[in-house]
Image (cartoon, rainbow, N blue to C red):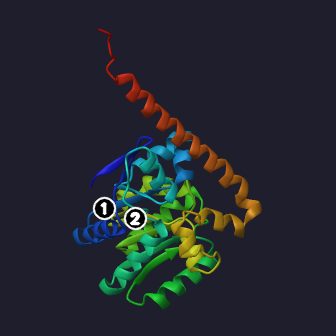
Amino acid sequence: MRTSDLFGVPVAAATMDDALRLVDDAIAARRRLQIGVVNAAKLVAMRRSDELRKDVLSSDVILADGAAVVWASRILGRPLPERVAGIDLMHGMFARGDRRGYRVYCLGAKPAVLDRALAWIRREHPGVTIAGSHHGYFSQADEPAVFADIVRAKPDILLIAITSPAKERFLARWSPQLEVPVCHGVGGSFDVIGGLVRRAPALWQRAGLEWLYRVLQEPRRLAGRYLKTNVAFALMVAAEWWRQVAGRAGTRPQQTGA
């Protein structure tokens, strides 16, 4: 699959249909597909953390989970076809799993939120088998036991609803040994399907303002974080755009007088 290099990250030029086809093929072949996703905040964080960068780059495919990433790709002349949001990809997996009987292991969120998310999956997608689950509040010392539980469950898909960088660190450390075809980090998606957080309406999503909708729900916690991240990402894009412009100007042949 073609990729677009964005700040040294090979982001797949994939549509949602492309991503779901990769999922189906990986499950059918029992082949590992570790899915990474990047948005503006994560690309900023990857520039600051070599460990996070290494963990994300260990993914088999990296998708653009953010409108800002798609916009940046077009500004920089490396266009991506569309946003492939992690939560939408999860919903697509559930829809296909309904028809194909996929086994899913859910890892993450607080115990009460996880229970509500599992109840939602069972209600909305009865064809999906919940192979197992574990809340996301465990220490590094607990990881071997969590790993062993996932292995025993033999899922087709592992969904990890843990915040970055812990999510990427867990996948980088354990996914090569899990023997799970598809591993997908879904961030706060269990909070959404569990009814704890409202997702932005489709119009806000299409306008690339899903982040603003989240800020309006939790302004004290999120306003400062998103402001810093968005400014930092805009500066990254501007600097890369200027580097490209300056590079092209420097390679133009000089005209000589008669």
The structure residue drawn at horizontal position 33% and vertical position 61%, both measured from the top left corner, is 33
Residue 132 seen in the current view: yes
Q: Is disc 2 placed on a helix, strand or loop?
A: strand
Q: Is disc 1 placed on a helix, strand or loop?
A: loop
Report x, y in % for residue 157.
Answer: 38, 71
Q: Which mark is residue 183?
A: 2
| Left or right, 96 with reference to 166 | left
Write down the quadrant of residue 158 in the picture.
bottom left
Q: Quadrant of the C terminus?
A: top left
Residue ranking furthest to the top = 258
Q: Tell me which label, 1 or 2, sits earlier in the chain.
A: 1
Viewer-closest of 158 and 197: 197
| Left or right, 207 with reference to 76 | right
Q: Which mark is residue 236?
A: none
Write down the quadrant of residue 64 in the picture.
bottom left
Name the residue beneath numbered marker 1.
32
Position of 164 relative to 24 (above/below): above
Write down the quadrant of residue 116 in the picture.
bottom right
Q: Amino acid at mark 1?
A: Arg
| CB contact under 8 Å: marks 1 and 2 | yes
